[in-house]
């Protein structure tokens, strides 16, 4: 340590120290005396200011990782950044980074890649704990990746924006993270004296210690969204095997996973039966149950749903798990449902209340934030039907206005699920689900405006069925 430097710090250094002062105060560990930490801060601060090239060789820079923050109130598109990789790179200023425009601190928390079920569960419990401990902070989804190896290097985490009025948010964040000493990377972000943004990497081993500083650089939005890659690796399943692998991996901790797996038929029907299979899709309270029941009696059809009755008793258990496990359950539910559909279609038409399109549309809408412009482009792989899943003859999507749907939910008076409450509160999420439904292909959804009276909706559905199915 350069003690001469410490004994006569420059004005610049003092200013930067002041800006990280609040953080250092809070990060003092019980066994660590104040002056020791101050010396460390001098050291890293000086290194950052005087020798950015040296800092460029920090562990973060070596990996050249890119961080992507989901769309949020400050940025309608995902926000991409990295750390200093060369002197000519354009540094980011708080103006480029609206989240820090008003000053203050932001944090990123990344969860190291590990066994996928464990990592997904850690992500979920950490997210829940952060929301509980930092109720006033904006907690956004963050992914970090190496551009050379996107799917293989992808790590998930959170980007946290505490309110300015809450200085102890930092302390609370560290308290949560100290419980997870392994595999968690914490970085803080603050404005420097020349309006540049600094990323500080903290080691959370027993106490919090700053280990590297780098300047933050802006990165252009990549052509292929890492958020879409993240969906494909963590919540969307395009084959029964993929989804079963996840439930097998978690069956030692979730015994119900074994029960679900036991309901999977070894033989996978793809196009058995003679009678048409008609799926009714739509957001909650668009009238699916009402229409499917009417179609059942008009067409003398079998009425089935996905997830099927034989596994629906465990639905709430899987709903409370990580996205990976929850969506694996619904994906498998479609395959178990497909076996029932194939059997029933040998003797009558089959009406199905929700199927694969629900699984895909809700997953895509949940994992992609912001407006519908952030959804994967039309014809993207994510909108394609799984090759090993029975393909219905017709899929009808019911749509109604937001106001009418909410009116119906309230009139129905059943207990709302958390997701329904979110749908009610979050019109952007509703729009993403509906738009994702509309982008599905092979088979695509045929849309019926379900706002008119039930009898009118039924007649429209019957007309479509007559036109597209052999009935
Ligand atoms: N076309 C319609 N016009 C008015 N109300 C309707 C119509 N279709 C259904 N409803 C009512 O809206 C509520 C939600 O319908 P439901 O069939 O349960 O929707 P979903 O199965 O899509 O959740 C129910 O109270 C139902 O009676
Ligand atoms: N085949 C299915 C059916 C439902 N889902 C998921 C999609 C959403 O997360 C919820 C929607 O369920 P919701 O409780 O609104 O469904 P119901 O209308 O009550 O059947 O279930 C699915 O992923 N796949």
Image: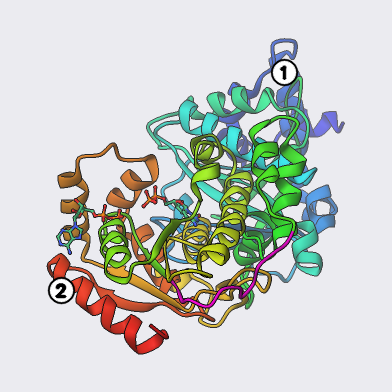
Q: Quadrant of residue 251?
A: top right
Kindly identify the residue that appears in the image at 55 percent across and 50 percent down.
141
Ranked by sequence position, the earlier of labels 1 and 2 is 1
**Nearer the viewer's eye, disc 1 or disc 2?**
2
Q: Quadrant of residue 43?
A: top right
Residue position for label 2: 456
Residue at the far front: name it.
347
Question: Horizontally, is 408 left or right of 9 in the view?
Answer: left
Q: Quadrant of residue 268?
A: bottom right
Task: Specify the quarter for ligand 1.
Answer: bottom left
Does the magenta portion include 269?
yes
The quarter of the picture where the N terminus appears is top right
Residue topped by disc 1? 35
Residue 100, x across and y down, in percent:
48, 50
Along the viewing direction, whichever of 405 and 124 lies nearer the viewer = 405
> From the Cβ of disc 2, is ligand 1 less than 8 Å away?
yes
Please name the residue shown 42% across and 86% down the image.
470
| Span of residues in magenta | 267-278
Q: Is there any visible trace of residue 101 in the rendered image?
A: yes
The one of 54 and 389 positioned closer to us in this rendering = 389
Distance in Å between CA atoms under marks 1 and 2? 77 Å
Q: 336 above or below 179? A: below
Residue at 49%, 69% (x, y): give it.
Answer: 347
Give left or right: position of 101 versus 12: left
**Which element is circle 2 on?**
helix
Residue 25, percent across and down?
Answer: 59, 22
Q: Residue furthest bottom?
A: 467
Instruction: Give the quarter of the figure containing the C terminus.
Output: bottom left
């Amino acid at each position: 340590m350069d003690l001469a430097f410490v004994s006569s710090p420059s004005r610049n250094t003092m200013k930067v120290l002041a800006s990280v002062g609040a953080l250092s105060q809070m990060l003092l560990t019980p066994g660590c005396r104040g002056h020791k930490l101050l010396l460390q801060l001098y050291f890293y601060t000086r290194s950052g200011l005087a020798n950015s090239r040296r800092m460029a060789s920090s562990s973060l820079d070596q990996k050249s990782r890119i961080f992507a923050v989901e769309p949020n109130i400050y940025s309608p598109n995902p926000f991409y950044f990295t750390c200093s990789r060369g002197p000519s790179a354009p540094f980011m200023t708080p103006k480029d980074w609206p989240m820090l425009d008003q000053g203050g601190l932001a944090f990123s928390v990344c969860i190291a890649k590990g066994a996928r079920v464990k990592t997904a569960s850690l992500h979920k419990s950490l997210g829940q704990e952060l929301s509980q401990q930092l109720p006033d902070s904006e907690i956004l989804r963050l992914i970090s990746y190496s551009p050379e190896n996107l799917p293989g290097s992808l790590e998930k985490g959170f980007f946290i924006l505490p309110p300015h009025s809450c200085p102890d948010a930092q302390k609370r964040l560290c308290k949560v993270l100290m419980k997870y000493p392994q595999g968690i990377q914490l970085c803080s972000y603050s404005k420097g004296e020349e309006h540049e943004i600094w990323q500080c990497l903290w080691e959370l081993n027993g106490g919090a210690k700053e280990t590297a500083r780098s300047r933050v650089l802006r990165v252009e939005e990549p052509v292929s969204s890492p958020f879409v890659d993240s969906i494909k690796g963590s919540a969307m399943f395009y084959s029964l095997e993929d989804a079963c692998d996840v439930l097998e991996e978690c069956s030692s901790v979730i015994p119900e996973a074994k029960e679900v797996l036991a309901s999977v038929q070894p033989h996978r029907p793809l196009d058995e039966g003679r009678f048409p299979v008609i799926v009714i899709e739509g957001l909650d309270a668009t009238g699916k149950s009402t229409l499917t029941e009417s179609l059942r009696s008009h067409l003398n059809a079998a009425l089935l749903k996905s997830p099927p009755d034989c596994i629906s008793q465990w639905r709430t258990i899987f709903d409370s798990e990580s996205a990976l496990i929850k969506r694996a359950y619904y994906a498998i539910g479609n395959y178990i449902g497909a076996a029932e559909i194939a059997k029933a279609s040998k003797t009558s038409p089959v009406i199905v209340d929700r199927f694969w399109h629900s699984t895909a549309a809700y997953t895509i809408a949940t994992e992609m934030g912001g407006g519908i412009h952030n959804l994967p482009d039309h014809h993207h792989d994510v909108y394609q039907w799984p090759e090993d899943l029975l393909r219905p003859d017709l899929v009808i999507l019911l749509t109604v206005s937001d106001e009418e749907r909410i009116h119906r939910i309230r009139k129905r008076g059943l207990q709302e699920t958390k997701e329904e409450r979110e749908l009610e509160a979050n019109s952007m999420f509703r729009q993403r689900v509906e738009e994702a439904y509309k982008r599905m292909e092979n088979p695509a959804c045929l849309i019926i405006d379900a706002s008119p009276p039930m009898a009118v909706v039924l007649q429209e559905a019957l007309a479509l069925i007559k036109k597209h199915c052999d009935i």
